[in-house]
Image (cartoon, grey):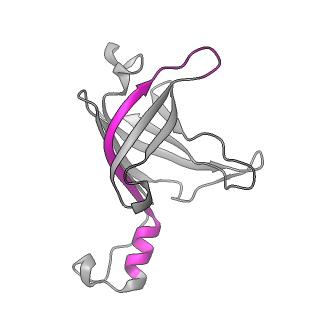
C-alpha cells in the first residue's frame, strides 16, 4: 500500500474491487447472497463523489442481445443479483468508541427509495482491505452485509 493509502480519509480516495460480500448470521454461520466470488467496483474521488456497483460473480448472460427486450424473468434475475448507487460522500471521523464512518448522499440508485437519502456506513482498513458495513439492524430486521474491498492497482 502506498503512503497515501495508510490512513482514512485520504486512503479512501481511489478505485476498489469487491472481494467479499457476506451476511453474518448466527455464529459461525455466514451467507453469501452474491456468491463466493462477487464482482464490484467502488470509487471515491478527491472532490467528494462516489459510485458503487456490486453483483453476483456468476450471473448468466441474457438470452436476448439487449436487456430491454429480455424476458421479464431474465431482467428480474439480473436485478436481483445487482446493486448500485452514486452521489456525493462526506467523511465522518470517529471519536472514542465510535469508529470512522462515511455518509453517501445518494442521487442515483437502482433502488429508487434510496434516491435523495443518506446512507451512513462504518468503514475501517483491515490490512490492504477497506471494510464497509451499515449499522447493526434493529431487532427483527435482517442482518446487514459486510463488504470487503481491495484497492485496484
Q: Is residue 123 left or right of residue 72?
A: right
Task: From the viewer's side, name the closer residue of 144 and 64.
Answer: 144
Q: Is residue 111 visible?
A: no
Q: Is residue 18 visible?
A: yes
Say if 105 sits above or below 67 in the image. above
Task: From the viewer's side, name the closer residue of 141 and 65.
Answer: 141
Q: Residue at x 61, y 22 (%)?
A: 98
Magenta-span inclusion, residue 153: no
Say if 6 sits above or below 92 in the image. above
Residue 88 locus on image (x, y percent): 31, 38
Which stretch did the figure color magenta? 74-98
Within the image, what quadrant is residue 42 found in? top left
Quadrant including the N terminus:
top left
Say if 147 sits above or below 101 in the image. below
Residue 18 locus on image (x, y percent): 42, 45
Number of marks: 0
Q: Residue at x 50, y 37 (%)?
A: 121
Task: From the viewer's side, name the closer residue of 103 and 56.
Answer: 103
Q: Residue at x 43, y 76 (%)?
A: 76
Say if 106 sits above or below 7 in the image. below
Q: Residue at x 57, y 23 (%)?
A: 99
Residue 4 locus on image (x, y percent): 32, 16
Q: Is residue 62 left or right of residue 56?
A: left
Residue 140 locus on image (x, y percent): 74, 55
Amino acid at each position: 500500500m502506498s503512503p497515501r493509502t495508510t490512513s482514512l480519509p485520504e486512503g479512501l480516495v481511489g478505485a476498489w474491487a469487491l472481494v467479499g460480500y457476506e451476511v453474518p448470521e448466527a455464529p459461525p454461520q455466514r451467507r453469501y447472497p452474491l456468491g463466493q466470488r462477487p464482482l464490484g467496483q467502488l470509487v471515491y474521488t478527491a472532490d467528494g463523489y462516489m459510485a458503487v456497483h456490486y453483483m453476483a460473480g456468476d450471473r448468466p448472460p441474457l438470452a436476448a442481445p439487449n436487456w430491454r427486450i429480455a424476458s421479464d424473468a431474465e431482467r428480474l434475475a439480473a436485478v436481483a443479483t445487482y446493486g448500485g448507487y452514486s452521489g456525493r460522500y462526506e467523511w465522518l471521523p470517529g471519536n472514542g468508541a465510535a469508529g470512522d464512518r462515511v455518509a453517501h448522499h445518494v442521487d442515483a440508485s437502482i433502488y429508487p427509495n434510496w434516491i435523495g437519502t443518506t446512507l451512513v456506513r462504518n468503514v475501517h482498513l483491515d490490512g490492504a482491505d477497506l471494510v464497509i458495513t451499515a449499522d447493526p439492524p434493529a431487532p427483527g430486521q435482517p442482518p446487514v452485509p459486510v463488504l470487503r474491498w481491495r484497492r485496484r492497482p
